[in-house]
Image: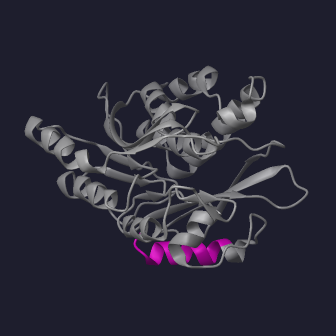
């Protein structure tokens, strides 16, 4: 992938009936809508062959007061050794939540072994100004190594702060602050950046910002803000964005699609029992993803 990608040009050119193969490097939750439980069906609906690389196994996601976590770090190199022996090829590497700092090297191994694959990094580390419970300072520091060479990097404002060292200032920030973060992330080696989740107080709009090395001025893409928060919306956004990219959409189109997908899924979610903690219910809006192929 060249450093000259722009937000208006497709990042992936889909040809004929070919099904792109994407490694999804995420955790797996037994209960709760997030991570591989979102990535596998969403990317599959977009006609992708999803190849999971499980970074951790959870009984439930970390918003539940009780959860069990199993770190899979010790098995991952042998897991990928087997892929290599089978001659498996990849068109993309899409990474999210990691189980340990050492897993950054596993993703870098994938980058080295599949240099032509598209690298999409959702640096899942925290939200609302705080790190997730299983993330240490060491893990956050290691995650910064994935910025360099990311074809698409999708941090929220908390994660952008962790990666750049720019102090977190909440979600109600101006475009100058967004540009400061974007410039820092591009300088760290990201080829394109999507800053997620800017919300101005009193407004019913959520803003995402797109910038690339070729077009560094952050462009705003807005969608409707619903008056409640749900776990897993970041994973759905990043998975929807990745699905659109591999359906041949431009980065800007993919961001717009992902925002709409999350909004529509959130509306359905509110009708479900225990929706505040269970996570975003995307199942009945997967038809929107399959429409990408038409």
Report the number of discs.
0
Residue at 74% over, 67% down? 170
Which stretch is magenta? 178-189
- Taking depth in this image into account, of 279 and 268 the one nearest to the observer is 279
Image-based side of 172 in relation to 90, left or right? right
Q: Is residue 2 left or right of residue 30?
A: left
Q: Indicate whether residue 276 is drawn in magenta.
A: no
Residues 84 and 204: in front is 84
Is residue 216 visible in the rendered structure shown here? no
The image shows residue 70, relative to residue 266, as above or below, that is below
Q: Residue at x 73, y 73 (%)?
A: 169
Q: Is 151 above or below relative to 294? A: below
Question: In the picture shown, does residue 29 fall above or below 132?
Answer: above
Residue 223 image point, x, y percent: 73, 46
Residue for point 10% across, 35% down:
86
Question: In the picture provided, is 229 more to the left or to the right than 279?
Answer: right
The quarter holding residue 257 reads top right
Residue closest to the far right: 202
Pinpoint residue 69: horizontal percent, then vertical percent. Answer: 45, 43
> Is residue 186 located in the magenta-colored stretch of the structure?
yes
In this image, 148 relative to 123: left or right? left
| Colouring scheme applied when the structure was drawn | one colour
Please, is residue 72 above or below residue 199 in the view? above
Q: Position of residue 282 (x, y in %)?
A: 61, 28
- Would you identify the image quadrant in which residue 17 lies? top left
Task: Note whether residue 284 is visible.
Answer: yes
For the N terminus, the quadrant is: bottom left
Instruction: Name the residue nearer the viewer: 126 or 266.
Output: 126
Which secondary structure dominates the residues rendered in magenta? Answer: helix
**Residue 111 screen position, x and y as percent:** 26, 56
């Amino acid at each position: 992938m060249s450093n000259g990608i722009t937000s208006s040009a497709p990042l992936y050119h889909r040809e004929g009936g070919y099904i792109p193969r994407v490694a999804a490097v995420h955790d797996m939750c037994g209960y709760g809508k997030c991570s591989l439980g979102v990535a596998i069906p969403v990317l599959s609906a977009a006609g992708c062959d999803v190849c999971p690389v499980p970074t951790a196994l959870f009984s439930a996601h970390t918003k539940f007061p009780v959860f069990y976590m199993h770190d899979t770090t010790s098995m991952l190199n042998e897991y990928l050794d087997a892929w290599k022996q089978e001659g498996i090829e990849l068109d993309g590497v899409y990474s999210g939540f990691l189980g340990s700092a050492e897993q950054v090297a596993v993703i870098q191994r994938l980058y080295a072994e599949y240099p032509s694959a598209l690298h999409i990094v959702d640096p899942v580390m925290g939200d609302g100004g705080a790190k997730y419970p299983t993330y240490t300072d060491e893990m956050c520091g290691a995650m910064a190594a994935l910025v360099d060479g990311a074809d698409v990097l999708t941090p929220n404002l908390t994660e952008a702060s962790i990666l750049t060292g720019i102090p977190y200032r909440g979600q109600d920030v101006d475009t100058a602050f967004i540009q400061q973060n974007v410039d820092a992330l591009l300088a760290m080696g990201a080829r394109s950046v999507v800053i997620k989740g800017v919300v101005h107080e009193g407004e019913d709009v959520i803003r995402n910002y797109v910038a690339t090395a070729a077009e560094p001025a952050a462009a705003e893409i807005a969608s409707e803000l619903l008056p409640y928060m749900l776990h897993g919306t970041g994973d759905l956004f990043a998975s929807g964005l990745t699905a659109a990219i591999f359906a041949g959409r431009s980065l800007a189109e993919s961001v717009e699609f992902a925002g709409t997908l999350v909004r529509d899924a959130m509306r359905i979610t509110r009708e479900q029992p225990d929706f505040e903690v269970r996570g975003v219910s995307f199942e009945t809006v997967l038809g929107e993803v399959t429409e990408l192929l038409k």
